[in-house]
């Protein structure tokens, strides 16, 4: 009797538990498919695009149209330049306008007009735009969204980042726009561009961030945001906006021949430039006085750098800060003020952001030993170095012809790296050509042995047995230091 009662009680308990779990599961499934849950799961896809209209309404008043005028004298020269564009050197209309127009026509003044965009950053009338929009302009006109026009003056320009700051004067407070944080921007996030493409004022386009840190060869501080938001001529200088209504970039460049590919200067890079232009009217950047390059795989292996991080000093400018501090060519810069340096671009940006006259701590690797130097930062100059091509002279069994790099030759071809032998020619199909040695290279070491003369070079090569590896440590004007591997 007692056993039967216990059995019935357990069975009843099991039944209640089964019903409880079935009800709980049903409620969970129902709640998952409820409208509230569905709405929460799809909110990013339904409400974000719809918010572009309110976003555009909020920030558009701070975006301006910029029109410039440049007075050009001598129409004949302008016409000749224009007529050469489609045909190059074989222009069939060469000097046509010289014959058609007389001297008086050629001395007339012509007005060249261009257009672009910009955005107001404070109520006092400071406007950020691109340098190429206002460069060499005789007159700059700014038009607000409400139709009012003002003449603007240039506060300062920075060609290196293609940024400029201009100012308009008005008695009324102007609508401004907040600057955001481009470092927080992520690939795939929505962004919006506003500008005047082809003169169509306050055109709004939207897209996503396609990539960050793009290098497009426009200057030493390339670090562009790539976006597929439509950017066209006239958009230059306009803002790239995030979904909070903040400027995260300045629309600057268009990919030639590409559709849906535009580039913007990150606002974090622009902030320091804008601040200096506003305060001083120019941008002053720090300078070490070194030629540098990043460590590629072979170079890192050659110097025993396992992680491949660091910057190789290619050359040191005599009398400049690095030279005064004791830094030498072939040193590898590892840190600046205890911050690790991974690439040459990292180092360039680090030093550029340090004030002239400030003392910094630079850690380098020299002969596999770490050393620290105190360097007082100088002012960055703007220089360019070119190189020519010498005549033929010596030859070895690798098909590499080398010559002495005399001070006269170095001066003739603007070469500052004067230690080593000069590669003047490569035989087609030779081991040297197949390995990648090029005419104009400077061979500085072979298998870690310094090469100072042509005699040194041939002596070292001769001692290497057939079939053994050869590691050539060379300097190339377009790439810096390289390691080229071949077999004798």
Image (cartoon, helix red, strand yellow):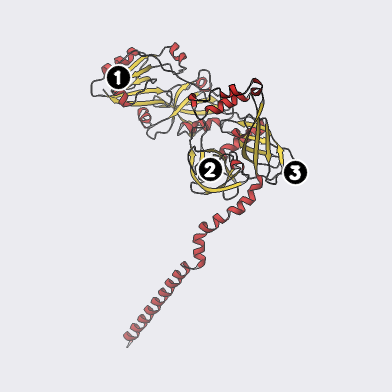
Which residue is the site of mark 3?
172
Numbered disc 1: secondary structure: loop
Marks 1 and 2, how far apart at CA: 50 Å
First along the sequence among labels 3 and 1? 3
Which quadrant is home to the N terminus? bottom left
- Mark before the other along the chain sequence, 1 or 2: 2
Identify the secondary structure beneath mark 3: loop
Asked which secondary structure carries label 2, the reply is helix
Give the x, y percent position of residue 222. Answer: 51, 34
Judge whether residue 377 can be spotted in this image: no
In the rendered structure, the answer to whether residue 439 lies left or right of residue 273 reads left
Looking at this rendering, what residue extends furthest in the left direction? 466
At 62% from the left edge and 37% from the top edge, which residue is drawn?
A: 115
Residue depth check, mark 1 versus mark 2: number of the one nearer the observer: 1
473, above or below 49, in the image: above
Q: Is residue 229 above or below residue 156?
A: below
Q: Position of residue 385 (x, y in %)?
A: 49, 21
x 29%, y 25%: residue:
486
Badge 1 is on which residue?
399
């Amino acid at each position: 009797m007692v056993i039967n009662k216990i059995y019935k009680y357990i069975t009843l308990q099991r039944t209640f538990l089964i019903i409880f779990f079935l009800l709980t599961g049903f409620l969970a499934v129902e709640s998952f498919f409820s409208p509230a849950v569905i709405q929460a799961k799809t909110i990013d896809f339904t409400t974000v695009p719809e918010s572009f209209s309110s976003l555009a309404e909020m920030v558009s008043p701070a975006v301006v149209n910029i029109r410039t005028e440049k007075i050009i004298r001598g129409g004949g020269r302008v016409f000749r330049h224009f007529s050469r564009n489609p045909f190059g050197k074989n222009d069939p209309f060469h000097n046509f306008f010289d014959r058609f127009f007389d001297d008086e026509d050629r001395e007339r003044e012509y007005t060249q007009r261009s257009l672009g965009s910009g955005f107001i950053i404070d109520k006092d009338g400071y406007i950020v735009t691109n340098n190429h929009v206002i460069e060499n302009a005789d007159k700059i006109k700014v038009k607000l969204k409400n139709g009012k026009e003002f003449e603007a003056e240039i506060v300062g320009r920075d060609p290196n980042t293609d940024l400029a700051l201009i100012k308009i004067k008005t008695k009324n407070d102007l609508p401004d726009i907040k600057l955001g944080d481009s470092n927080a921007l992520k690939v795939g996030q929505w962004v919006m561009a506003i500008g005047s493409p082809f003169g169509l004022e306050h055109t709004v386009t939207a897209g996503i961030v396609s990539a960050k840190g793009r290098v497009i060869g426009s200057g030493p501080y390339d670090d562009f945001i790539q976006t597929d938001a439509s950017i066209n001529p006239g958009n230059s200088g306009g803002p790239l906006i995030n979904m909070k209504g903040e400027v995260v970039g300045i629309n600057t460049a268009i990919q030639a021949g590409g559709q849906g590919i535009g580039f913007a200067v990150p606002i974090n890079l622009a902030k320091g430039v804008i601040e200096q232009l506003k305060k001083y009217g120019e941008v002053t950047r720090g300078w070490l006085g070194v030629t540098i390059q990043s460590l590629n795989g072979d170079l890192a292996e050659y110097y025993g750098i396992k992680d491949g991080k660091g910057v190789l000093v290619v050359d040191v400018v005599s009398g400049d800060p690095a030279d005064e501090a004791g830094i030498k060519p072939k040193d590898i810069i590892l840190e600046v003020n205890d911050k690790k340096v991974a690439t040459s671009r990292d180092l360039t940006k680090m030093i550029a952001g340090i004030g002239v006259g400030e003392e910094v701590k630079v850690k380098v690797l020299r002969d596999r030993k770490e050393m620290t130097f105190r360097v007082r930062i100088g002012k960055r100059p703007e220089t360019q170095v070119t190189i020519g091509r010498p005549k033929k002279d010596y030859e070895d069994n690798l098909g590499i012809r080398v010559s002495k790099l005399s001070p006269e030759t170095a001066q003739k071809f603007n070469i500052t790296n004067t230690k080593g032998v000069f590669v003047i020619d490569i035989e087609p199909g030779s081991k040297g050509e197949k390995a990648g040695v090029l005419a104009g290279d400077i061979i500085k070491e072979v298998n870690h042995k310094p090469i100072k003369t042509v005699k040194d070079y041939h002596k070292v090569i001769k001692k290497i047995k057939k079939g053994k590896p050869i590691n050539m440590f060379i300097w190339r004007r377009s790439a810096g230091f390289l390691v080229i591997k071949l077999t004798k």
